[in-house]
Image: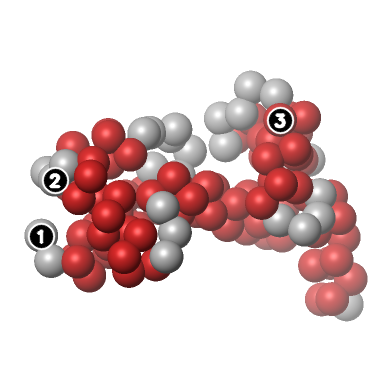
Amino acid sequence: MVQPQLLNGFQDLLEQYETDKFSVVRYAEMLSVTTTHVSRTVKLVTGKNAGGMMSGRLLLSAKRKLVFFDLTVSEIAYFLDFSCPFYFTWLYSKQSVETPKWFRWLEVAQRK
């Protein structure tokens, strides 16, 4: 599979299965390539490893839900298949510069 096609396929799968916690192995199987091929291609094209890209996609999904849905942070955490809202908040804060609540507050304030 050519690099742009593989990357696009990987991104499409990340979006399609946003609430599923698949491993890189599972995505590679779905793309009919090896895990090494997915990982190397993603790293070469984006500069991120495949796991980082998966985490980034999950963060994007969380941000969309925080802005466009009237759900609590806990409800979003459970929707994204986190067993503990605290872990979701910790992971979100680690990948972003703010907590989910602060992100939502900033977004709402900017829209007014």
* Residue under the point 87% across and 60% down: 105
Task: Depth check: give the residue in front, 40 or 23.
Answer: 40
Tell me the number on the disc at residue 97: none
**Pointer 2 residue:** 33
Mark 2 burial class by Cα count in 10 Å: few <14, some 14-19, many 20+: some
Q: Position of residue 81 (x, y in %)?
A: 56, 30
Callout 3: SS: helix
Residue 61 is at least partly visible in this image: no
Kindly identify which residue carries mark 1. 1
- The answer to whether mark 1 and mark 2 are in CB contact below 8 A is yes
Give me the C-alpha separation between circle 1 and circle 2.
8 Å
Residue 67 at least partly seen: yes
Which of disc 1 and disc 3 is earlier in sequence?
A: 1
Residue pictured at 20% horizontal, 50% vertical: 37
State the scheme by which the image is colored.
secondary structure
Image quadrant for the C terminus? bottom right
The N terminus appears in which quarter of the rendering? bottom left
Of pointers 3 and 2, the one earlier in the residue sequence: 2
Q: Quickly name the residue at label 3.
A: 87
- Upstream in sequence: badge 1 or badge 2: 1
Q: Secondary structure at mark 2?
A: loop
- As shown in the figure, which amino acid type bears the numbered disc 3? Tyr
Residue type (three-letter) at the residue carrying disc 2: Val
Instruction: Please state which of residues 76 and 89 is positioned toward the viewer in this rendering.
Output: 89
Residue 87 sits in quarter: top right
Q: Position of residue 22 (x, y in %)?
A: 38, 33
